[in-house]
């Protein structure tokens, strides 16, 4: 089904109630894999970070990564979950070429964390509670690269390449309970939940949670039921969605697709689906398995995990300030509205502004540059602000130069442009481009005299009491000084020379 085959979103919601379930996989930032000592460093030569254990060779035995367990407990506590006193791993059996053991070591009926919740704030300030079913430990698969063909997928490819460096990297899978009651805001809730979860994971320091690098990815489960009914519909699962915007688009598309199928008298197939960034559509992957199809059974080579209550409470006491509480504190310190803070969060600029303030900038100036010029440049480049080639320390220096009067806003934008272009530090760009504000009173006085002489009629209007006309003379001086004069000081000099009170 293509985008043009869909019913409108409004018509879909007029007839059906969406129910969602979100499964988020978080790749932990441990130095070694979950069950062996192989490195997890990104960018290594393919298949160079493997061993008999993560390759599933006969006779190899796994050992649990203690930091992986600790990270799982931290995530569970931050999600208001109960932490199991005793849990164990299981074998999830299936054949994928990128899982060399032909089974995944995961957790099934005994997860390490369960029954939690995460409150998320929507753009209008409404808080929506998403209930957490479980958070469990498992390992990632390898990476398949399909060569040839038009889609980059296995269908139509000439051959496939397998890299097992990722196989065995620790994962935490966080599964929500069915999300009901969101109605037309279901896609927005999905996006807000993943965004809040990403901020929480980063705050805990257990993962960088960079979705574009696959360190965090979301499976969007969605079904529709006729309005006024309680029984869930058949669900689809859109796999490995790797951006906040795409999570929202995938949920929205599936609502419209399900509604089109059901309204046309068809039935929904329980299946996995692929998301396509170019148009926001999804296409069929494979028929979705049920739990019994995986033939789960307890992992015989690993002992159960039984975290002591003392250890759990110690970890609880070491949790950092959680993102929502931190944002509320910062909002009060910065004196801004909830809407403004939500805009900063949506832009991915909270930590950048905090770091810029810590580097010496005024909070208002830090917000101004990150949410103005730098947000614009990030949007043009299609990247997160953090990916721009400028540091919070450099932004703080630009703000300092403006505050000292060495730069005005126009010149500051040129300095930022130079830093982004790789021309050096803000001070080096100022020197190379000759961008300092003209503060020499003699030079400014000469420029003002010349502007008055060249615009006698305007000068007469100002002498006659039309002070607003001074803007034209200010503009002439700014043009003559290539924008490097202090506009406020220029205006003062013009009025002084014309004998007019400001």
Image (cartoon, rainbow, N blue to C red):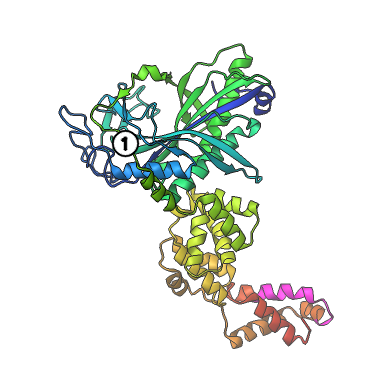
359 relative position to 85: left or right: right
What span is in magenta?
463-477
19 relative position to 160: left or right: right
Q: Position of residue 66 (x, y in %)?
A: 29, 43
Is the N terminus in the top left, top right, bottom left or bottom right quadrant?
A: top right
* Residue at far left of view: 59
* Residue at far right of view: 464
Is the C terminus in the top left, top right, bottom left or bottom right quadrant?
A: bottom right
> Dividing the picture into quarters, in which one does residue 91 lie?
top left
How many numbered marks have been drawn onto this rendered protein structure? 1
> Dividing the picture into quarters, in which one does residue 46 lie?
top left
Q: Secondary structure at mark 1?
A: loop
Q: Position of residue 368 (x, y in %)?
A: 58, 62
Question: Which residue is nearer to you in this view: 369 or 267?
Answer: 267
**Tag 1 residue:** 305
Q: Is residue 379 magenta?
A: no
Can residue 412 be seen here? The reply is: yes
Which residue is at 73% across, 86% downward? Answer: 496
* Helix, strand or loop: magenta stretch: helix
Which residue is at 55% across, 50% downward? Answer: 324
Q: Position of residue 140 (x, y in %)?
A: 33, 34
461 relative position to 113: left or right: right
Which residue is at 64% across, 16% downward? Answer: 263
Q: Position of residue 499 (x, y in %)?
A: 77, 87
Question: Which residue is nearer to you in this view: 101 or 362?
Answer: 101
Question: Which residue is nearer to you in this view: 278 or 12?
Answer: 12
Mark 1 neighbour density, 10 Å: few (under 14) some (14–19) many (20 or more): some
Can residue 453 be seen here? The reply is: no
Q: Is residue 468 magenta?
A: yes
């Amino acid at each position: 089904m293509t985008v043009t085959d869909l019913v409108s979103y409004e018509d879909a919601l007029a007839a059906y109630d969406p129910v969602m379930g979100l499964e988020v996989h978080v790749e932990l930032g441990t130095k070694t894999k979950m069950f062996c000592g192989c490195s997890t460093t990104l960018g290594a030569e393919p298949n160079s970070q493997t061993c008999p254990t993560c390759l599933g060779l006969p006779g190899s035995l796994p050992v649990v990564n203690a930091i992986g367990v600790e990270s799982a407990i931290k995530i569970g506590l931050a999600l208001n979950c109960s932490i199991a006193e005793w849990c164990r791993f299981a074998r999830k059996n299936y054949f994928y070429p990128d899982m060399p053991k032909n089974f995944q070591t995961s957790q099934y009926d005994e997860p390490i964390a369960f029954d939690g919740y995460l409150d998320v704030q929507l753009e209008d300030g409404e808080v929506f509670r998403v209930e957490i079913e479980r958070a469990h430990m498992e390992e990632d698969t390898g990476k398949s690269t399909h060569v040839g063909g038009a889609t980059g997928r296995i269908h139509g490819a000439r051959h496939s390449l397998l890299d097992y460096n990722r196989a065995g990297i620790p994962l935490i899978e966080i599964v929500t309970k069915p999300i009901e009651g969101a109605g037309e805001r279901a896609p927005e809730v999905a996006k807000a939940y993943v965004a809040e979860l990403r901020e929480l994971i980063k705050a805990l320091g257990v993962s960088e949670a960079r979705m574009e690098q696959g360190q965090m990815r979301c499976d969007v489960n969605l079904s529709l039921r006729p309005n006024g009914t309680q029984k869930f519909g058949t669900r689809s699962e859109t796999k490995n969605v790797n951006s906040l915007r795409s999570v929202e688009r995938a949920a929205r598309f599936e609502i419209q697709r399900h509604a089109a199928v059901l309204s046309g008298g068809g039935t929904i197939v329980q299946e996995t689906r692929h998301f396509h960034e170019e148009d926001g559509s999804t296409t069929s992957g494979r028929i979705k398995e049920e739990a019994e199809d995986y033939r789960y059974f307890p992992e015989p080579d690993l002992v159960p995990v039984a975290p002591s209550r003392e250890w759990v409470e110690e970890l609880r006491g070491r949790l950092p300030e959680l993102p929502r509480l931190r944002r509320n504190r910062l909002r009060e310190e910065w004196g801004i509205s909830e809407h403004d803070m939500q805009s900063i969060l949506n832009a991915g600029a909270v930590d950048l502004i905090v770091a810029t303030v810590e580097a010496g900038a005024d909070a208002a100036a830090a917000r101004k540059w990150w949410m103005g010029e730098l947000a614009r440049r990030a949007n043009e480049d299609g990247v997160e602000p953090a990916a721009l080639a400028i540091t919070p320390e450099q932004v703080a220096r630009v703000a300092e130069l403006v505050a000292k009067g060495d730069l005005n806003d126009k010149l500051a934008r040129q300095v930022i442009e130079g830093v982004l272009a790789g021309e050096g530090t803000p001070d080096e760009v100022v020197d190379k481009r000759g961008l300092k504000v003209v503060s020499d009173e003699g030079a400014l006085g000469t420029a003002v005299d010349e502007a008055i002489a060249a615009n006698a009629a305007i000068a007469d209007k100002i002498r006659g009491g039309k002070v607003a006309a001074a803007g034209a003379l200010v503009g002439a001086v700014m043009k003559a000084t290539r924008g490097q004069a202090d506009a406020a000081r220029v205006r003062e000099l013009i009025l002084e020379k014309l004998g007019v009170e400001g």
